[in-house]
Amino acid sequence: MQTLTNKRVLLGVTGGIAAYKSAELVRRLQDQGADVRVVMTRAAAEFITPLTLQALSQNPVHTELLDSETESAMGHIELARWADLVLVAPATADFMARLVAGRGDDLLTTLCLAAECPLAVAPAMNQAMWANPSTQQNCTSLADRGIHLFGPGAGLQACGETGLGRMLDIEEIVIQTAGLFTSGVLAGRRVLITAGPTREAIDPVRFITNHSSGKQGYALATAAIEAGASVTIVSGPTHLDPPDRANCVFVTSTNEMHNAVQEAVLDVDIFIGVAAVADYRPVSVSEQKIKKSAAPSNKGITLELVENPDIIATVANSEPKPFTIGFAAETENIMEYARQKLVAKNLDMIIANDVGDDDIGFNSDQNRTTILWPDRTEALPMMSKSALASRIIELIAETVEKDD
Ligand code: PMT
């Protein structure tokens, strides 16, 4: 299970021989699902090139405080705001002294001053430097301020001496990093969510659609991210900002949504179909705007429709099948129709939604639903779509865990 899914780690690298190990650290943090950005001191760049860390982290490496180009892209304040954790590994004796003094004389120390997230340092230095009372006093000051100290470890050092001062093993740093975060109920799970409406073109200016705003689907994506999942949304047209940290694929028609889901579903654990998918589309799309004069007077025109693929049924009948949750938008016989869909589409759960009531369902901020499993139901009271999303994610996590 990935222990750092959705976590943003700003890795500070300072100038010690252990800096070469930072390359491995970037990789191992990423293996655990972390998004890693690297900031190096000038001295660190003498031990390992920024290019190496840039290639591994797949993000630009930041080295200078006063660099107009990087400041206009992602400046030091934005970097500090971006991070969920600033981890400095290796941290030299000089860096720790500057941190204690509250200096802001390079990019990394300035970032540490600006960061409101947790800070951790993995000291690495010669054993005599580590044992020096100044260094020891600095460590005490850092610990008193709530800064996490990872190590150091003991053993043979690059200088040939033996003792305390080696940077901790990379695996241990990763374990201690993960230990700073509480993992959510979907930690390490991969979730695919469809959201919003689909649109079926009639001609270049007209289409068939429905009232879905995308609010419920986007709220579920946010709740799944908060629960530690890595989330992809396949979204029809909406006016919403996509949730932070979700991988988004934007589509218009049902066929496009179907194809995008088929591509993204291959390696997911959980699929949630919240999108209000058009069941039918016009048999053909007119290349030009259909003229009113095309209809004989007072006769109107007939639009011939063909059935769209059933996206969720395709997912639920594929091998391997992800845990599959649908929504049933109904205006009558809500529970009966929802249960029929649960069975007919081979779903693991379905959320029955009364869309005949304007205060709930489409485009509202509130929703009142009943959740159905093959063997039970649970009615939920009216609540905001985001509160409902959190509750649904909890129930999904409980059910998935029982099935594991
Ligand atoms: O977006 P909001 O404004 O917040 O509104 C939320 C909502 C009302 C859209 C949502 O809560 C909801 O009920 N979504 C399901 C809408 C729907 O298409 O319901 P349905 O009963 O027609 O379909 C049942 C299930 O099959 C759904 O999971 C749907 O995504 C899926 N489906 C339907 C048809 C199709 N061709 N492919 C599908 O995958």
Image: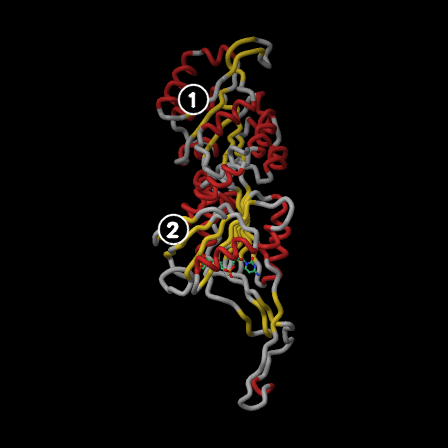
Answer yes or no: do the residues labelled 1 and 2 have beta carbons within 8 Å?
Answer: no
Tell me: 146 left or right of 192.
left
Quadrant of the rendered image containing residue 330: bottom left
Q: For the residues marked 1 and 2, what is the alpha-carbon distance in whole angstroms? A: 58 Å
Residue 294 in the image, given as x and y percentages of width and height = 60, 86
Secondary structure at numbered mark 1: helix
Coloring applied to the structure: secondary structure
Q: Residue at x 58, y 63 (%)?
A: 253
In the picture, residue 42 is in which quadrant?
top right
Vertical side of 200 occupied by 142: above or below: above
Find the residue positioned furthest to the bottom. Answer: 297
- Please say if 101 is above or below 243: above
Q: Dot 2: few (<14), some (14–19), or many (≥20) neighbours within 10 Å? A: few
Indicate the quadrant containing the N terminus: top left, top right, bottom left or bottom right. top right
| x 41%, y 12%: residue | 133
Front residue (pair 216, 155) = 216
Which numbered disc covers residue 176?
none
Looking at the rendered structure, the kind of residue marked 1 is Ala
Location of mark 2 (residue): 379
Q: Residues within 10 Å of mark 1 (few under 14, many from 20)?
A: some
Locate residue 255, reporting x and y percent: 62, 61
Dividing the image into 4 quarters, which one contains the C terminus? top right
The residue wearing badge 1 is: 97
Tell me which amino acid carries mark 2: Ala
Residue 399 drawn at (x, y percent)? 48, 41
Q: Secondary structure at mark 2?
A: strand
Asked whether 121 or 217 is in front, the reply is 217
Q: Nearer the viewer, residue 165 or 217?
A: 217
Q: Earlier in the sequence, mark 1 or mark 2?
A: 1
